[in-house]
């Protein structure tokens, strides 16, 4: 079949399979997840052999060492994928949860019940472990999913998809509950984005370019996460040692992730004391600082910041730094340049903290804690499929609950509307 015919047929089958998995019991879904985990461990050699094909091709294509590192399936990756699935097994099943219930004056009993979203399309780059993470979460939440991984991980994704398909069929669920588009052709993405008759939501995961492409070309609602321009504001009443530890962790621990700090805002009243202190720590960690004129008075080696630095997502050891006059100034800067991901304040003043929490418009706001905590596992979701920076219908890390919706269920005893 052609690329178009193949993708359309997959979408149709996913729609049919969605009914089956939506009705599956918790025990049945958990058996599938456990079976996938077992198969990943049992087939580790075969999985890594296929992964080596992708790595060889990636090197020939000139991919960066960082990209190749994300692509590599090590023994630790195998253990992490299997362990992650078993963690999902342990999570409560959200499907069928009654979130509210009341009896109306008419005598009807009205409940709201959690249901699967339906058919999810996911387009993602690099990391083959996303194939397992996404499949596991969507399955537990009663959804069917069509996966389109990056061409650089083609062989790895195909062998992982085979583990999933085998586990589904062995546990009496159609293999079409989880499907991987079996081709590198980019036209497959364009076709998938037009299947609004069969898919309910698209989740792109990768660089800003990919997400903007999906958003601009999809006929299906998209859960977006363009980038993570995360700020830490060090208030005039901050504990400066705590501020130093928080800012260092936010920037240095894993600079290439979306919840890493990209801009540090410092109140003018503590700039003279704090900036040399934290600046030396950043210098020793190999961080390049892009500072405003006031910042450079206190950190002479900082480079001059330009307008393009304030909305930048560096994803490396580069940090923009600005001295602000007040919490109002900090909030104004955040409102102008943030991406809706994560903001943090370091302060001992509870009123200032409450105001910051109320006015900083991002999916997570931290008070005296690192931006790195905006993660499904750290926030108690157990796992996440990604972080949404749009507010419909989820905002922040998306776990099992965010992969569901709710419907009204009404019980009556012959009532008719007057």
Image (cartoon, rainbow, N blue to C red):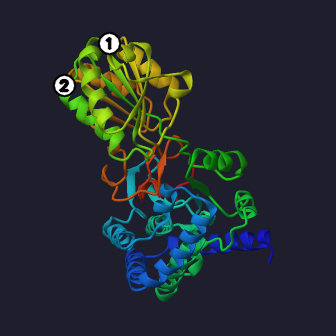
Residue 194 x %, y %: 74, 57
Residue 276 x %, y %: 27, 22
Q: Is residue 240 above or below residue 16?
A: above
Q: Give the label on residue 239, or none.
A: 2
Q: Nearer the viewer, residue 24 or 343?
A: 343
Residue 47 shows in this picture: yes
The image quadrant where one finds the N terminus is bottom right
Q: Is residue 395 above or below residue 112?
A: above
Please tell me in which quadrant of the rendered image residue 202 appears: bottom right
Secondary structure found at label 2: loop
- Please rate how many residues cluster around mark 1, counting C-alpha atoms within 10 Å: few if below 14, some from 14 to 19, many from 20: some
In the rendered structure, which disc, 1 or 2, sits on the residue that comes first in sequence?
2
Q: Is residue 273 above or below residue 369?
A: above
Which residue position is annotated with label 1?
Answer: 268
The image quadrant where one finds the C terminus is top right
| Outermost residue toward the front in this view | 301
Q: Residue at x 34, y 41 (%)?
A: 252
Q: Residue at x 27, y 11 (%)?
A: 269
Please tell me in which quadrant of the rendered image residue 197 appears: bottom right
Secondary structure found at label 1: helix
Q: Nearer the viewer, residue 203 or 254?
A: 254
Residue 220 x %, y %: 67, 53
Q: How many marks?
A: 2
Q: Is residue 392 above or below residue 22?
A: above
Is 126 on the left or on the right of 352, as rendered?
Answer: right
| Outermost residue toward the bottom in this view | 170
Q: Residue at x 50, y 86 (%)?
A: 172
Q: Give the label on residue 389, or none.
A: none
Residue 148 shows in this picture: no
Q: Residue at x 49, y 73 (%)?
A: 23
- Please rate how many residues cluster around mark 2, counting C-alpha atoms within 10 Å: few if below 14, some from 14 to 19, many from 20: some
Q: Nearer the viewer, residue 243 or 291?
A: 291
């Amino acid at each position: 079949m052609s690329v178009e015919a193949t993708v359309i047929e997959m979408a149709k089958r996913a729609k049919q399979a969605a009914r089956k998995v939506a009705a599956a019991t918790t025990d049945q879904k958990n058996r599938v997840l456990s079976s996938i985990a077992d198969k990943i461990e049992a087939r580790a050699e075969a999985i890594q052999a296929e992964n080596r094909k992708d790595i060889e091709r990636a090197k020939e294509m000139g991919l960066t060492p960082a990209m190749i590192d994300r692509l590599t399936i090590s023994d630790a990756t195998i253990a992490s994928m299997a362990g992650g699935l078993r963690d999902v097994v342990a999570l409560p099943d959200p499907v069928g949860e009654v979130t509210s219930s009341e009896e109306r004056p008419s005598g009807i009993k009205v409940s709201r019940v959690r249901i699967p979203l339906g058919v999810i399309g996911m387009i993602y780059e690099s990391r083959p472990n996303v194939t397992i993470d996404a499949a596991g979460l969507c399955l537990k939440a009663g959804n069917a999913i069509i996966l389109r991984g990056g061409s650089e991980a083609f062989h790895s994704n195909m062998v992982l998809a085979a583990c999933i398909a085998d586990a589904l069929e062995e546990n009496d669920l159609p293999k079409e509950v989880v499907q991987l588009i079996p081709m590198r052709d980019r036209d497959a993405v364009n076709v998938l984005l037009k299947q609004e008759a069969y898919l309910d939501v698209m989740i792109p995961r990768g660089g800003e370019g990919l997400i903007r492409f999906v958003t601009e070309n999809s006929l299906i609602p998209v859960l977006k996460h363009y980038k993570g321009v995360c700020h830490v504001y060090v208030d005039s009443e901050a504990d400066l040692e705590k501020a130093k530890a928080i800012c260092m962790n936010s920037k240095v621990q894993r600079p290439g992730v979306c919840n890493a700090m990209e801009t540090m805002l410092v109140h003018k009243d503590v700039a003279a004391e704090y900036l040399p202190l934290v600046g030396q720590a950043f210098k020793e960690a190999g961080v390049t600082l892009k500072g405003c004129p006031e910042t450079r008075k206190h950190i002479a080696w900082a480079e001059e910041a330009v307008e393009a630095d304030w909305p930048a997502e560096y994803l490396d050891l580069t940090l923009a730094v600005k001295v602000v006059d007040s919490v109002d100034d900090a909030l104004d800067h955040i409102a102008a340049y943030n991406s809706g991901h994560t903001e943090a304040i370091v302060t001992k003043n509870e009123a200032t903290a409450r105001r910051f929490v109320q006015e900083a418009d991002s999916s997570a706001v931290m008070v005296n804690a690192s931006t790195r905590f905006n993660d499904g596992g750290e926030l108690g979701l157990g796992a996440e499929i990604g972080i949404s920076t749009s507010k419909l219908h989820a905002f922040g890390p998306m776990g099992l609950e965010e992969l569901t919706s709710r419907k009204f269920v009404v019980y009556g005893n012959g009532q008719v509307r007057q």
